[in-house]
Image (cartoon, rainbow, N blue to C red):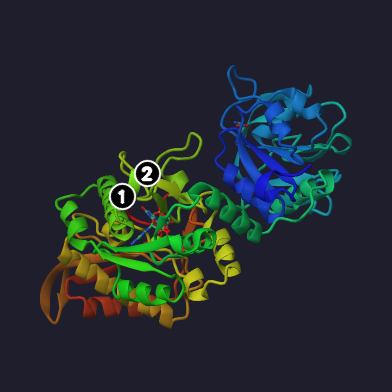
Amino acid sequence: MTAEGPHADHDLVLVVDFGAQYAQLIARRVREARVYSEIVPHTMPVEEMLARNPKAIVLSGGPSSVYEEGAPSIDTGLFTAGTPVFGMCYGFQLMAQGLGGEVAHSGVREYGRTPVSVTAPGTLLADIPETHNVWMSHGDSVARAPEGFDVLASTSGTPVAAFEDVGRGLAGVQWHPEVLHTEHGQEVLEHFLHDIAGCRQTWTMLNIVEEQVEAIREQIGDGRAICALSGGVDSAVAAAIVQRAIGDRLTCVYVDHGMMRLGETEQVRSDFEAVFDTLDVVDAADQFLGALEGVHDPEEKRKIIGREFIRTFEAAEARVFGDVEGGATAYLVQGTLYPDVVESGGGAGTSNIKSHHNVGGLPDDLQFELVEPLRTLFKDEVRLVGEQLGLPSTMVWRQPFPGPGLGIRIIGEVTRERLDVLRQADAIAREELTRAGLDRDIWQMPVVLLADVRSVGVQGDGRTYGHPVVIRPVTSEDAMTADWARLPYDVLERISTRITNEVAEVNRVTLDVTSKPPGTIEWE
Ligand SMILES: Nc1ncnc2c1ncn2[C@@H]1O[C@H](COP(=O)(O)OP(=O)(O)OP(=O)(O)O)[C@@H](O)[C@H]1O
Ligand SMILES: O=c1[nH]c(=O)c2[nH+]cn([C@@H]3O[C@H](COP(=O)(O)O)[C@@H](O)[C@H]3O)c2[nH]1
Ligand SMILES: NC(=O)CC[C@H](N)C(=O)O
Ligand SMILES: [Mg+2]
C-alpha cells in the first residue's frame, strides 16, 4: 500500500477536491503529519483512486449541497472498499448521505469560530478538550449519522458534528481541521491518519526535494534551462533544486527592471554568486519603464510586467545558449508558490484576485515550458526546504518582495522620478525595521507611494504640496491571510520623521491598519 515513483516507500493519502477553498491546505497538513499526499479531482473514478493504492482518502469541503441535483458526488463503493476515508465538511456530509444517514439544510448557518462539545471522544477526538473552538463554514448539517457510526461531538446548532466507525476506518467532522484557526485541528487529522488509518510517518521535506529532482531530470532530460532568479527565497530554493537535477546546464537570470529597491541588484549579485554557478544580470529598465508609460490600471501593469519578463528571458536564453538547434524545448524555472496560483484564479473554480506576474500575468504566446518545483507549496514550507538544502539563512528568511517590484506600489503611473522617491522612502523604512530588530517578526512591510494624491504640509515655515506614503507592515504565516502588525510607536515615529525629513517630495506618512481579507498585502 504505497505511493508510486519517487515516493514509492511512503504511504499515500489522496485528497479528493470538491471545489474547496482549502484543498491545498489539507494536503499540506497531511504532509505536516509526515504522510505523503496528493490532490485529485472529485471527477476521478473511484477505481482509479483505489488503483493508486492509497493508505487513506480525505474528502474535502466544497460549495455545493449534497442533496442538490448535479452536486459533485462520489461512488459509495469507496466507503466499502476497505480504504480508510475521512470527510471534512462537504466530505463529511457526503459520507453521511452515502451510507444511509441524513443531510439537510438545517437553517442554522455556522461561519467562522464555533464552540464544539466533545460528547464521546472515541479515537478521532481522543485527548481533545471537551469544549474547544473550531472553524466552521456551512449551511447544511448531518441530521442523522449512518448506522454503525458513533457520534462524537456537537455544537449548539449541529447535533452531529463529528462521527466515526473505527472498525470500517471511516470518520468525519463538520468543521475544518485544516485551517490554523481551528483549535486541535492537526491533532484530529493525525488521529485519523495515524490511529485510524495506520499511515506510517515517513514523509519529510527532504522527500519533496528528492521527488522534484527526479521529476525535473525526467522533464528536462539532457536539455538546458534558465531560472528566473529574483533574490527572493522562492526562486533561490527552486534554483537550488534544479541545479541538483541538471547541474551546470542551469543558468540563473536576474532582471533589473528598474523597479527594484535601493541597492538590491548589487546585493543579489554578491549574495548569489557565492551559491550559484552562473548568474546573468540583465539591465532591462528602459524596456520595462517604456512599456509602462501612461499606464495606471493595476491589472494592466501586471500583465505588461509579466510579458516583459518573458521577453527578457527569451532574449537571455538566446544569448546564453545561442540559437537552439532544431526547435529544442526551452525551459524556464520559476519560484511559483501555491498562493501565486490561487490568487491568479488558478485553483479549481477560484476567483482571480490579482494576476501574479509569474502565473496570471504570463503572455498568451509563451514559448517556454515551465519548471515550477514549488507550485503546490506555501512559503513556510519552502523556507523549511531551503534550510534543509543548506541555503544561507539571510536568503531563507528574507522578506518577500513581489516580482513587479515598486511598480505595484506606486498608485498611478510609474515614472523614474516617482520610483526614486519611493526607493528612498522604502530604504528608510526597511533600515529602521532592521535597526529595531523586527525583521523576523514582520512578514513584509510594503511602502506605497500615493503618487496621484497630493497633500498640503508645512515644513520650514513654508507650505508644501507633496505626496503621502503608506506603510503597510503585516504579519502572516503564508500570505493567504495577514494581519496588520502592531509596530511599536517609537519605530513608527522614527520612520515617519526620517521619511518626511529626508525625502523632499513626501510630506505625510500614514499607516495601513487593514487585515487580509479584506485588504490584500500589496495595494495593487
Ligand atoms: N527581478 C526578477 N528577475 C528574475 N526573476 C524574477 C524577478 N522577480 C521575480 N522573478 C520570478 O518570479 C517568481 C515569483 O516571484 P516572487 O516574488 O513570488 O518569488 P521570489 O522573489 O522568488 O520570493 P519572494 O516571494 O520571497 O520574494 C520568482 O520566484 C522568480 O522566478
Ligand atoms: O512575485 C510576485 N508577483 C506578483 O505579481 C505579486 N503580487 C503580490 N505578490 C506577493 O504575494 C504575497 C501576497 O500578496 P497580496 O496579498 O498583495 O496578494 C505578498 O507577499 C506580495 O508581496 C506578488 N509576488
Ligand atoms: N465548506 C463546506 O464544505 C460547505 C458544505 C456545504 N456547502 C454546506 O454549506 O454545508
Ligand atoms: Mg520576490
Mark 2: which amino acid?
Gly
Q: Is mark 1 within 8 Å of ligand 2?
A: yes
Q: Quadrant of ligand 2?
A: bottom left
Q: Residue at x 72, y 48 (%)?
A: 8
Instruction: Work out how far the residue at label 2 is from the one at label 1, CA to CA, in angstroms.
Output: 8 Å
Q: In the image shown, does 81 or 187 lie closer to the viewer?
A: 81
- On screen, residue 292 versus residue 38, left or right, reads left
Q: Position of residue 417 (x, y in %)?
A: 15, 66
Residue 455 at least partly seen: no
Secondary-structure class at tag 1: helix
- On screen, residue 522 versus residue 12, left or right, reads left
In the rendered image, the vertical position of residue 36 relative to residue 45, given as above or below: below
- On screen, residue 318 versus residue 444, left or right, reads left
Q: Is mark 2 within 8 Å of ligand 2?
A: no
In the rendered image, the vertical position of residue 263 relative to residue 480, given as above or below: below
Residue 227: mark: none
The earlier-in-sequence mark between 2 and 1 is: 1
Q: Which of the 4 quarters of the picture holds residue 250?
A: bottom left
Badge 2 crowding class, 10 Å Cα cut-off, few under 14, some 14 to 19, many 20 or more, is many
Badge 1 crowding class, 10 Å Cα cut-off, few under 14, some 14 to 19, many 20 or more, is many
The reply to whether the C-beta atoms of the residues labelled 2 and 1 are less than 8 Å apart is yes
Mark 1: which amino acid?
Gly
Q: Residue at x 52, y 74 (%)?
A: 393
Q: Residue at x 44, y 67 (%)?
A: 399
Q: Which residue is mark 2?
A: 360
Among all residues in the image, which is located at the extreme front? Answer: 326
- On screen, residue 518 versus residue 121, left or right, reads left
Q: Which residue is mark 1?
A: 306
Q: In the image shown, does 140 or 315 lie closer to the viewer?
A: 315
Q: In the image shown, does 89 or 76 lie closer to the viewer?
A: 76
Residue 259 at least partly seen: yes
